[in-house]
Amino acid sequence: MRHRKKKTTLDRKREPRMAMLRNLATSVILYEKVKTTKVKAKAVQPHVEKMITLGKKNTLAARRQAHKFFYIENPVKKIFDELAPRYKDRHGGYTRVTRIGTRRGDTAEMVLLELLK
């Protein structure tokens, strides 16, 4: 039974799905906006929000936890140096999903996932 199972599998096994979400979260953090499908954006949104909340704690443990999630160091630096001070007075809701139409090839619904200013 699948009652109360919230996880979206995105038609992938666990390891490839987590790799895709980590890479997408890295792109959102570094470029502050990413064009992707609606389902992927909804799946990566909680990860981005959690990482920014970790950055607001600004402890060594939080920094190590963020390093454990990302593959490279650049998004961790950006979270702790730029994004955390920007969102210090905000309690969650750091991202916005804006619909931009459908993809031409397979009519997948495309969205723009961006960080709020």
Image: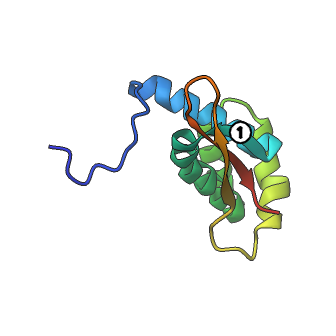
The crowding category of the residue bearing disc 1, from other C-alpha atoms within 10 Å (few below 14, some 14 to 19, many at least 20), is some
Residue placed at 57% from the left, 29% from the top?
A: 20
- Residue 101 position, x and y percent, is 65, 43
Residue placed at 80% from the left, 37% from the top?
A: 74
Q: Which residue is mark 1?
A: 35
Give SS at disc 1: strand
Number of numbered tags placed on the structure image? 1
Q: Nearer the viewer, residue 38 or 93?
A: 38
Quadrant that contains the N terminus: top left
Which amino acid type is marked by label 1? Answer: Lys
- Residue 96 position, x and y percent, is 68, 58
Q: Outermost residue, left direction?
A: 1
The image quadrant of residue 69 is top right
- Residue 100 position, x and y percent, is 69, 46
In the displayed structure image, the side of residue 77 where residue 59 appears, left or right: left
In the displayed structure image, the side of residue 89 where residue 93 appears, left or right: left
Q: Is residue 22 above or below residue 4?
A: above
Q: Nearer the viewer, residue 68 or 34?
A: 34
Quadrant that contains the C terminus: bottom right
Q: Outermost residue, bottom direction?
A: 89
Q: Nearer the viewer, residue 79 or 112?
A: 112
Q: Is residue 31 above or below residue 11?
A: below
Residue placed at 58% from the left, 51% from the top?
A: 45
- Residue 111 position, x and y percent, is 65, 45
Residue placed at 73% from the left, 30% from the top?
A: 72
